[in-house]
Amino acid sequence: MSEPDPPTVVTFDAARLGAETPPWELVRSEHLARCRILNLRRDLSIDPRDGRQHDFYVIEAPDWINVIPLTADGQVVMIEQYRHGSGEVTLEIPGGMVDEGEEAHEAAVRELWEETGYRSGRMSLLGKSRPNPAIQNNWLHAFLAEDCTFEQIPIFDGSEHTAVRLVPLGDIPQLIATGMINHALVIVAFHEFSLQVTKEFGPVRTK
């Protein structure tokens, strides 16, 4: 019995993105729930391959931001925070939702201040990504905050509470590798930061 032919490998071509995976036609949408920080939507869409209809569930959420705050001596201003989804305390960078009428940059400045009490000398965009395009419609905007200085202890209202922790920048890769930092969106931000460092200064060499 002969071996089956291996699958044909097609090299990615940005110009042909979607040529064999066309969009599905939306028939109708309905909201199933409207919550404080998200809405749940059901879409009925047509499969372009055979015309059959299928329903899909979408979480509508505001855009999010997170911030890598760096002090002049190379410390990352991080936070410990209890997360109800995972039921555990996580080590993260400041982040949150972009409020209605607010720009992502403004939200980054606000969240850094509210969660840590630090101000930044310069805030710049690292990049943006889709948190989970399978079921969510929003963007994550990651920022780098440089020359951060402490001004006051954060004042919390409502249910939010964080504890500020200074972490040497050089410790971040090991904290990710060991799972101490396990928030996917935090890891994405540090990856985008590493891409920027590589672009500006070349590959990072380790012994």
Image (tube, helix red, strand yellow):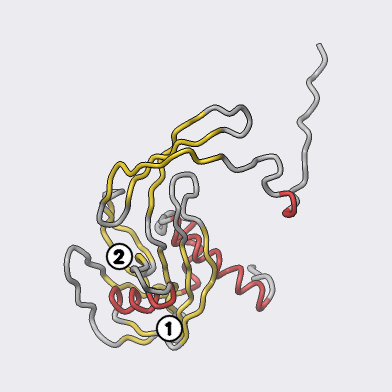
| Residue at image mark 2 | 80
Q: Circle 2 — which element?
A: strand
- The image position of residue 15, as x and y in percent, is 74, 54
Instruction: Count neighbours of disc 1 (C-alpha within 10 A) and say few if under 14, some if 14 to 19, many if 20 or more.
Output: many
The image quadrant of residue 184 is bottom left
Foreground residue among 110 and 147: 110
43 relative to 100, above or below = above
Residue drawn at point x = 34 percent, y = 45 percent: 40
- The image position of residue 200, as x and y in percent, is 65, 78
Q: Which amino acid does label 2 sit on?
A: Glu
First along the sequence among labels 1 and 2: 1
- The image position of residue 50, as x and y in percent, is 61, 27
The image quadrant of residue 111 is bottom left
The answer to whether residue 18 is left or right of residue 38 is right
- The image position of residue 90, as x and y in percent, is 33, 58
Q: Residue furthest front?
A: 27
Foreground residue among 18 and 177: 18
Q: What residue type is labelled 1?
A: Thr
Residue drawn at point x = 25 percent, y = 85 percent: 152
18 relative to 170, above or below = above
Residue drawn at point x = 37 percent, y = 87 percent: 149
The answer to whether residue 115 is left or right of residue 60 is left
96 relative to 151, above or below = above
Foreground residue among 157 and 16: 16
Instruction: Count neighbours of disc 2 (C-alpha within 10 A) and say few if under 14, some if 14 to 19, many if 20 or more.
Output: some
Q: Circle 1 — which element?
A: loop
**3D distance between C-alphas at marks 1 and 2:** 18 Å
Q: Residue furthest right?
A: 2
Q: Residue 71 carries which label?
A: 1
Quadrant for the N terminus, please. Answer: top right
Q: Which mark is residue 52?
A: none
Quadrant for the C terminus, please. Answer: bottom right
